[in-house]
Image (tube, rainbow, N blue to C red):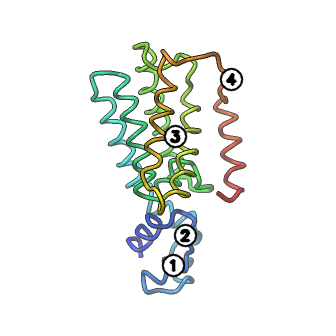
Amino acid sequence: MVQSAADVFRERGLNAPLEAIAQRAGVSTGTIYHRFGSREALIDAVVPDYAEDQLDEAAAGAEACADPWDGFALYVERVCELQASNLALNDVISRNHPGTAKLAEVCRRSQEQARRIAERAQADGALRADFAVEDLLFVFWSNAMLIRFTAETAPDAWRRSLAFTLDGLRTGAAHELPTAALTPAQVEQVMAGRGRAAI
């Protein structure tokens, strides 16, 4: 049942119907509820380990780059690739998983990794100084929507969009921004509201 859930979530995202998982596993939907209690508990039983592995691997690759900008760009590109290749990870990275405690902790750790990678590129002078790690969430949210809407027609369209974004994040391209970055508290508030809204 766990493998069936992992496969369906990967193909259809974390909002995939539990009926589809039950059918894939050859059990009833009631069996899923009996074993896990809720969709959130099922997600927390299936997704956090491989999400953490993939996100850790992306961060390790970035931190291994000698050039801080290359490391930052590699990290962002790799995370966007994860979104494009696995709709469960697309939802994880774009924070579309309310009520999943284990997965929320994976995301918290991942955000701290991203902060270190970004700060390293800023310290080197390559990443614009007014960039905040909270801004990266907007990149991933935008990418999540682009992937969902272009997957069948132009599955690599996200790469072009990301290239424009990365060029705009270089110090040499920086212009004064019209508003401040969200605070961590504002990000939490946005994510809480987003959890109640349909993507």
**Disc 2 packing (10 Å; few <14; some 14–19; many ≥20):** some
Identify the element where label 2 is drawn.
Answer: loop
Vertical placement of 187 versus 198: above or below? above
Residue 196 lies, in percent from the top left, at: 71, 56
What distance separates the C-alpha of mark 4 from that of mark 1?
43 Å
Identify the element where label 3 is drawn.
Answer: helix
Identify the element where label 1 is drawn.
Answer: helix
What distance separates the C-alpha of mark 3 from that of mark 2?
24 Å
Q: Are marks 3 and 4 in contact (CB under 8 Å)?
A: no
The residue identified by callout 2 is 16
Residue 128 lies, in percent from the top left, at: 51, 18
Q: Which mark is residue 20?
A: 1
- Foreground mark, 1 or 3, reads 1
What distance separates the C-alpha of mark 1 from that of mark 3?
30 Å
The residue identified by callout 3 is 108
Q: Are marks 1 and 3 in contact (CB under 8 Å)?
A: no
What distance separates the C-alpha of mark 2 from that of mark 1?
7 Å
- Foreground mark, 3 or 4, reads 4
**Disc 3 packing (10 Å; few <14; some 14–19; many ≥20):** few
The residue identified by callout 4 is 180
Q: Please tell me how many numbered marks the rendered image carries.
A: 4
- Which label's residue is closer to the chain start, 3 or 4? 3
Vertical placement of 26 versus 14: above or below? below
Q: Are marks 2 and 1 in contact (CB under 8 Å)?
A: yes
Q: Residue at x 51, y 45 (%)?
A: 105
User: In the figure, residue 117 lies in which quadrant?
Assistant: top left
